[in-house]
Image: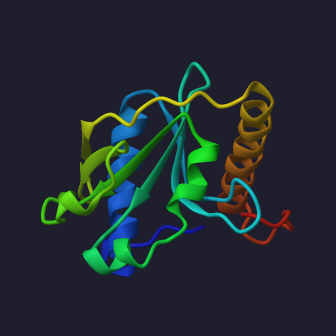
């Protein structure tokens, strides 16, 4: 993972960056494009100081949202679930009972807190370990791009 200027990032990636900046400012550790299990990839996963896990899906347009039929599968992998969209997004499309974040490339604001559904302890522990390994591999890849690292970076 290397630095990319704004012009090289897709709209959803720019939203994710703003979300990550906001959540990091509130004490969360964040990773983008995290794979909680094979076949699933969340845009942002955030880990709080007390072990709480949030998933944020970033949608840059109506078409991006309507083409996503897999988001409900992410609910089993977090304590709170959020959508992150820009100010122009038609938020009435978003499902009830989910969190809402308005974001841009530089920051975000939580408008509606996602309802809390606590993860089972065993799943939380496994997910936190996977999160830590993923974050460490990403960091190592930045420091040593030629190193052989496990899949999932």
Q: Is residue 145 left or right of residue 21?
A: right
Foreground pick, 103 / 82: 82
Foreground pick, 132 / 58: 58
> Quarter-wise, where is residue 22 in the image?
top left
Please say which color scheme the image uses: rainbow
Residue 153 is situated, as x and y percent measured from the top left of the image, at: 72, 63
Residue 120 is situated, as x and y percent measured from the top left of the image, at: 72, 29
Q: Quadrant of the N terminus?
A: bottom right
The answer to whether residue 116 is above or below residue 44 is above
The furthest residue to the front? 96
Q: Is residue 126 left or right of residue 87?
A: right
The answer to whether residue 144 is above or below residue 127 is below
> Quarter-wise, where is residue 65 in the image?
bottom left
**Rendered residue at 77%/46% (across/down):** 133
Q: Is residue 3 left or right of residue 100?
A: right
The answer to whether residue 125 is above or below residue 75 is above
The furthest residue to the left? 88
> Quarter-wise, where is residue 16 in the image?
bottom left
Residue 136 is situated, as x and y percent measured from the top left of the image, at: 72, 47
**Rendered residue at 81%/30% (across/down):** 122
The furthest residue to the top? 50
Residue 127 is situated, as x and y percent measured from the top left of the image, at: 73, 40
**Rendered residue at 18%/65% (across/down):** 89
Foreground pick, 136 / 55: 55
């Amino acid at each position: 993972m290397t630095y990319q200027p704004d012009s090289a990032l897709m709209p959803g990636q720019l939203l994710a960056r703003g979300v990550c900046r906001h959540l990091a400012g509130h004490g969360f550790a964040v990773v983008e494009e995290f794979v909680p299990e094979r076949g699933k990839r969340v845009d942002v996963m955030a880990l709080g100081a007390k072990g709480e896990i949030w998933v944020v899906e970033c949608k840059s347009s109506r078409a991006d949202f309507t083409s996503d039929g897999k988001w409900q599968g992410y609910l089993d992998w977090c304590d709170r679930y959020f959508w992150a969209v820009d100010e122009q997004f038609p938020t009435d499309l978003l499902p009830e009972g989910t969190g809402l974040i308005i974001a841009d490339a530089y920051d975000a604001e939580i408008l509606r807190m996602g309802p809390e559904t606590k993860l089972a302890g065993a799943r939380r522990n496994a997910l936190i370990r996977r999160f830590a390994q993923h974050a460490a591999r990403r960091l190592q890849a930045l420091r040593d791009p030629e190193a052989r690292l496990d899949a999932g970076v």
